[in-house]
Image (cartoon, rainbow, N blue to C red):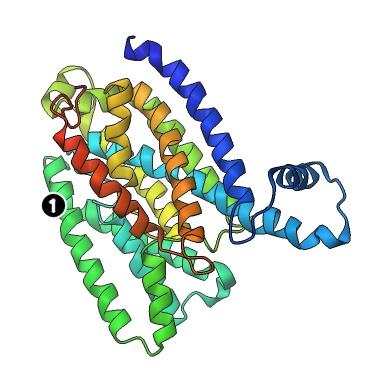
Amino acid sequence: MRRSAVTPLLLTLLVGLLVGSVFIAIGTGSAVIAPPETARYLWAALTGGTISADELTRYQIIWQIRTPRVLLAVLVGGGLAVVGVAIQALVRNALADPFILGVSSGGAVGAVAVSLLGALSIFGIYAVSVGAFAGALLATVLVYTIAYARTGVTPLRLVLTGVALSFGFQAVMSVMIYFAPSGEATSTVLFWTMGSFGAATWGSLPIVALIILIGAVLLHQCARPLDVMSLGDETAASMGVNVARSRQALFLVTALMTGAMVAVSGAIGFVGLVIPHITRMLVGAAHARVLLIAPLLGAILMVWVDLLARTLVAPRELPLGVLTALLGVPVFILLMRRRRYVFGGTS
């Protein structure tokens, strides 16, 4: 079958798989709640129904703790995949991911500074998230300013600047952790920098969802420029694409999305690197199709990774970045071993 014909069928299949995965993840954890009860509690929450007093604890586990956490996993997984697709085309580098431009490291520095120094206390429980987002925006400005030249921002300068500043941000973060007065604070920061959805609440979801969904829509509308830019700047210019303006706009959108995701989940690697390549194997390299399928694959993967993170060694929780790396490395090696697959191309 042609890949364009496969896309609607695959889209339907993945939507069903995502809904099923979300339902299973909400009902599964250190306290397993049967599917009928899970469905009843969700229905009661959505419709304003009533539950008995002895069910209140299980209802709160389902609605107040697990549901926002699983929905955040869906948003972040889908967002990382979409941003990974866009950045790989933006910098024409098959090894690019949402964190290659230093935005993630900048966000981590902001979060660590708030956690260890007690800054931004006026934001209360959201202080760390605000600090992470501010750090990510500052990193974005620095990367773009340093990479900018008279001829504009080239992919190579963007990548090199992002990688260099990423190492610099990591060094700053390491120094702050080294001089941290509390060992508990240090372990908390290290865990946050490796990724977690443990702080997910209903209050933190709307803003993140709005940024990720708007960003995903904008990137999908830029599917044709992404197709052309992946062929090279000269080819894109000859086809009527304003490369400098498009790259600037795409860089801003991807940076804002990455900053929002880092602010609520920490640094989670490999999702934005591996998912775009898997998607291209399934539906080809056309970004109109890739940007439809990739977020669903990323969301499904992240839901199951988060489920493993909170159940494998329960009641303790594993960092998400550790599991995504353990899964992503062998998958990436298998992709490289496939002779028919051309990284960043069709096959």
- Measured as percent of width and height from the top left, residue 279 is found at 33, 30
Q: Is residue 75 left or right of residue 104?
A: right
Q: Residue at x 32, y 44 (%)?
A: 272
Q: Residue at x 28, y 27 (%)?
A: 280
Does residue 50 sit above or below 319 in this rendering? above
- Measured as percent of width and height from the top left, residue 100 is found at 24, 51
Amino acid type of the residue tagged 1 in the rendering: Leu
- Measured as percent of width and height from the top left, residue 90 is found at 24, 36
Task: For residue 228, say whether it is visible.
Answer: yes
Determine which quarter of the picture holds residue 1. top left
Q: Which of 192 and 42 is in front in this view?
A: 42
Q: Is mark 1 on a helix, strand or loop?
A: helix
Residue ID for mark 1: 160
Q: Residue at x 40, y 69 (%)?
A: 191
- Measured as percent of width and height from the top left, residue 319 is found at 40, 63
Q: Which residue is drawn at 22% across and 19% down?
A: 240
Q: Nearer the viewer, residue 249 or 326?
A: 326
Does residue 110 sit above or below 20 in this rendering? below
Does residue 313 sit above or below 157 in this rendering? below
Q: Nearer the viewer, residue 13 or 150?
A: 13
Task: For residue 248, say whether it is visible.
Answer: no
